[in-house]
Structures are given as structure tokens and as C-alpha cells.
Image: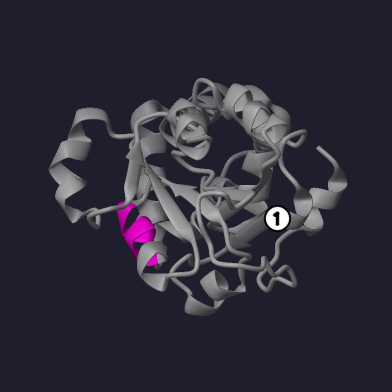
Amino acid sequence: MSSAIFNAIIFESKYNMKGNFNMGNKLILFDIDHTLLNTTKMVSNFTNLIIKKSNLTEEEVIKLTSNYTSSLPHVTYFDFTFLIQTLNLADKQTKQILSEYKNNFELYPKYDQVNKVLSELNILGYSLGIFSEGVPSFQINKLKNLKIDEFIENQYTYITQSKRSESFLSSLPKSVIVDDNIDIVNLINNHGKHYPIHINRKGKLYTIEKSSLIKGITSINSLSELVDILVK
């Protein structure tokens, strides 16, 4: 990935798409966690990495991670590098873990068909970007290791500590926004500028929450459905 992406954390946009927004819009922004990245597997990989490189047991790692997470004001403040600093490991162990964290892309599993779908959307003429929430350095590291930079345009990489910010949503160019979080999708819908698409990553558990999704919002179960929806 080009180093330019590290400068692509944009909180205000200069891009203005003319005309009323509709499904013919040519900019799509993707959430990272649970949308492109299988975050559940990533967290499991992180736990196994710490166990492998330290003298800690699985139970100890889980407990220490829980203690760190519970100390945060919100889950979006989680940063793996900060977590490692709380474990009181030997310097050599810390360096080994952080090196793997930064450079081992296998720790960051993509969902099936991510590359295929992004490639198809590029071929169809769509510009693709990122709509992400969390510690910027942590999110950028995930993005780097997903190795999808050939599909994503740096100028459309948006990372914030809170997607719920009115000013943040207003600063984005009109877009199709794909996100797994129902609350965020509903918020985007109510904001009115963008077209949200919900992606269900919870399988059958989704049926329990589906009633909270605002009626009329498109929901998909895999990224492969996105292409069919956009080319209708």
C-alpha cells in the first residue's frame, strides 16, 4: 500500500457531487470492521499471537484484554499497541508482537469475495473508499494489511473516532455507505445525505435485531449481493 494512505484521514471533504443522490452515484464507502475485515477472527489471531510470543496463558490474555477494554470510554478507543503496553512483557517479546501486528497480513482475514467484489465495482466505474471508526493508526494498520489498496482511492479514506458526528457525516461527499452496524446505518439514513446499505454479518442472530433496522433500508448478507443491487 502506498504511504500516501497514511495521510488520507480526512475529516472535512472538498468534494461535492452535483445532483440528487440516487443509486447511480459512483462513490461507495466501506466500513472496515465486520464489513471488509473479519474482526472476530482478527481478535482471535491477536490473542494467539500474544500467547505464542509471551509466557501468558489464554486465560490471562483474555482477562488482561478485558481489563484494558473495560477501562476505555468506548470500544472505538481500543488500540492493540496500547493493549500490549499494559501487559508488562519483556522488551523483546513486545517488539516481536508489534512487528507481527504491523507486518503480518495473515492476522487480518478478509471476508470471502472482498477482492472480487471490489474489482467488479471498479470495472463498473465506481470509486471506492473507506468509512471507518476507531483509533486512526489502528484502523490504517488494518487497512494496510487487508491489501486492497489497488481498489481503494486514498482521497476517499475517511477515519473518525465517532461516526455519529453530524459534522463528520456532513463533510463526506454523497455516497453509498456499506456498514454492518444497524445503529450507524439508521443514523446515516436519517441524516439524509447518503444512501446506506446494511450488511448482515451476524447470520441467524440478525433476525433478532432486524426489527430495529429502519423500514426501506437495503440489507444484504454478503458483499456479492452489492453488485447486483447497484447494477439494477
Whether residue 184 appears in magenta in the rendering, the answer is yes
Q: In the displayed structure, does residue 83 sit left or right of residue 142? A: left
**Crowdedness of circle 1 by 10 Å Cα count: few (<14), some, many (20+)?**
many
Q: In the displayed structure, does residue 126 sit left or right of residue 75? A: right
Q: Where is residue 52 in the image (x, y as percent from the top left)?
A: 54, 22
Q: Where is residue 147 in the image (x, y as percent from the top left)?
A: 71, 30
Residue 96 seen anywhere in this rendered image of the structure: no
Seen at 43% across and 70% down, the residue is 192
Q: Most extreme residue toward the bottom, as rendered?
A: 167
The total number of labels drawn is: 1
Q: Where is residue 189 in the image (x, y as percent from the top left)?
A: 38, 63
Seen at 54% across and 44% down, the residue is 32
**Colouring scheme applied when the structure was drawn:** one colour
Q: In the displayed structure, does residue 12 sit left or right of residue 33? A: right
Task: Please state which of residues 115 and 229 is positioned toward the viewer in this rendering.
Answer: 229
Seen at 70% across and 55% down, the residue is 156
Q: Position of residue 204 (x, y in %)?
A: 19, 29
Seen at 44% across and 48% down, the residue is 179
Task: Please state which of residues 219 and 99 is positioned toward the viewer in this rendering.
Answer: 219
Q: In the displayed structure, does residue 209 sit left or right of residue 36? A: left
Task: Please state which of residues 78 and 140 is positioned toward the viewer in this rendering.
Answer: 140
Task: Please state which of residues 122 and 164 is positioned toward the viewer in this rendering.
Answer: 122
Disc 1: which residue: 156
For the N terminus, give its image quadrant: top right
Q: Main secondary structure of the magenta part?
A: helix
| Kind of residue indicated by mark 1 | Tyr
Residue 194 seen anywhere in this rendered image of the structure: yes
Extent of the magenta region: 182-187
Whether residue 9 appears in magenta in the rendering, the answer is no
Reply above or below: 114 against 140.
above
Q: Is mark 1 on a helix, strand or loop?
A: helix
